[in-house]
Image (tube, grey):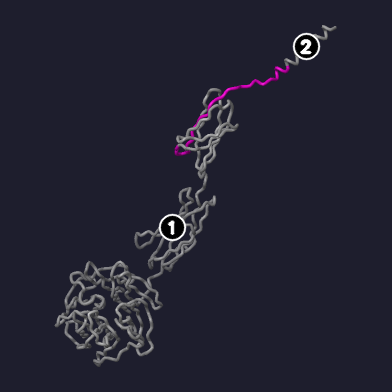
Amino acid sequence: MKNHIFKIFFTISALVLFCACSEETITITGQGTLTGKVVEKSTNIPLENVKISTNPNTSTIFSDSEGNFQISNIDVGDYSVKAEKEGYIVKFEGATIQESVSANVIFELEIETANNDAPNAPILLEPLNDSVEVGLSIDLVWSGSDPEEDELTYSVEILNDQNADVISFTEITDTTLTVSGLMYNTKYFWQVTANDGINNSVSSNVFNFRTIEFPENRIFFTRKINGNNVIFSTDDDGNEIQLTSQNNNSWRPRKAQSLNKIAFLRSNGGQTHVFTMNLDGSDVQQITSAVPVNGFNFEEIDFEWTNNDSQILYPSFDKLYVIDSDGSGLNQIYQTSNGNFITEVDWNQNTATIALKTNNSNGYEVEIFTINTSGVVQDIILQGITGAAGGIDLSFDGTKLLYTRDVTGNENQEYRQLNSQVFIYDLTTMTTNSTVSFEKPPGTNDLDAKFSPTEAEIIIENTPNDGLSQSNIYKLTLGQVNGRELIEEDAKMPDWK
C-alpha cells in the first residue's frame, strides 16, 4: 500500500516538474553596435550636431562634423532611431541590432520649410490698369498673402516708354509705396514681387498708367541752388517745375512762343554759350560755339529770339551776332563805335527794331538805343547819365520800351545799385513816363522788367540793395498804385510769355 502511494506521488511530481520546465522562456542575450550618417537631403552636405536617440531607449548622442554617429553596446533587438536638428524635419529610421554586428542607418534630413508653399501672387490695386492723367507723385497699392501666413517682403520695379531707366524698390514690408519725381506724359509699367524668405519669389501681373500732360506754364525764372543758377517754370498758382539740373550753371530763360522752346545761357568749359531746350527741360542743344557769349558781368547779359524765333541775337563784348536756331549761319550785324560792351538786346517782330543797352567794362556809361537790322541807329532812349540801367523790353507793337535805372546815379566798384526803378519810354513821342515802380519797398531795387503777355502788367525782380539778400519776382499792374503782387520767392531773371 505504501509503495503504491509512493508511486502515485512520484508520478505527480514528475508531471509537475515537466510542466514547469516546458513553460520557461528562452532568453537571447548579446550586444551590437549602431552606426550611421546624417546628411542634408538634395545637397548631401553632412550635418553636425544632429541629436540621435532610439526607442527602446539607449544612449542619446550627436553627429560629428562629418555627420557620423555611433552607439555601442546596444542590446540586440529591433529599434526605431530618431534624428532631429533645429531647422530640419525630424526623421525616423528602423534598425535591427545583432550580436557583435554593426547596424548602419543613413538619415537624409529635409529643411523644415521644404513643404512650405510659395506666396500667392500679389494683386495690384491702385492705380487701376490703363489709368491716365496720373500725377507725378503717386501711391502704388497692392495686396499680398501667403498660405502659411509667412512674413512677406516685396520689391517693386517700374519702367517707362521714354527711356531705358528702371526704378527699383526692395525690402518693402508694407503694401503701399509712394513714388515721386515721375515724368510728364509718360506711360509707366509696374510690377510687384513677393518673397517669403523660403521659396522663389512670385510676381504680380504688370499694370500700366500714364502721367499728366506737361502744363503750359508761362512764367520762367532762375534760382540759385548750391552755387549754380537753375531754371524753373511756374503757373499762375505758383506750381513750380525745375527744368535744368543744379549740377549745371544755367540762367536767363527766354521762351520762343512759336517753337515751344526755351533759350538760355549756360557755362560750358570756362565759356558761356546759348543753349535751347524743350519746355519740359528735355532735348538740350548747344547753339553757339565759335563765338561765345561774353561781356560785362554774365548775370547782366541778355539775348533774344528774332525773325519769328528762327534766329537768336546775342552779344559778345562790343559786337552783336545773329545765329540760326540750329547753330548755323553765324553773322555779326553790329559793333559799338566807342568800344563799349553790348550787355542787353531785345527785338520787335512787328517793326524789325532791335533795342540795345551798352556800357563800359565797369557797367556804367550806359546807353540805351534802337537800331535797324542793318545796324543803323534809330532812337536814343538813354544817354549821358551816371549810374546803372538796363532791363530793356519792347512792347508788342514796338511803340514802348521798358527799362530800369538807378535814380541815385551812384557808381561803385561793386556795381551796387541803390534805388533802381522801372520806367516806360514812348518811342512815338520820344518821352519817358515817370516811374511805375509803385509800392517799391525802401532800400530795394526793381530790376529785369518785362511786359506781361497782355501788357496790362509788368513782371520784375525786386531785391534789397545790399547785393546779398534774396530776390523775389513781383507783378505790377500798370495804372494801379497798389498793384504790386508777389509771384515767386527766391527767384530772378523773369520771363513771361
- Vertical side of 277 occupied by 202: above or below: above
Coordinates of residue 298 in the picture (x, y in percent) = 24, 75
Q: For the residue marked with disc 2, what is the amino acid?
A: Thr
Mark with earlier residue (1, 2): 2
- Vertical side of 436 occupied by 10: above or below: above
Give the tally of numbered discs. Answer: 2
Q: For the residue marked with disc 1, what is the amino acid?
A: Val
Badge number at residue 396:
none
Marks 1, 2: nearer the viewer: 2
Q: Is residue 465 left or right of residue 110?
A: left
Assess disc 2: are there few (<14), some (14-19) or many (≥20) residues with their C-alpha within 10 Å of its C-alpha. Answer: few
- Residue found at the very far right of the displayed protein: 1
Helix, strand, or loop for circle 1? Answer: strand
Residue shown at the point (22%, 85%) measured from the top left: 368
For mark 1, what is the residue?
A: 156
The one of 481 and 50 positioned closer to us in this rendering: 50
Coordinates of residue 72 in the picture (x, y in percent) = 53, 28
Q: Is residue 108 left or right of residue 279?
A: right
Q: Is residue 356 left or right of residue 71?
A: left
Q: Quadrant of the N terminus?
A: top right
For mark 2, what is the residue?
A: 11
Chain part drawn in magenta? 19-45
Q: Is residue 190 magenta?
A: no
Residue 155 quadrant:
bottom left
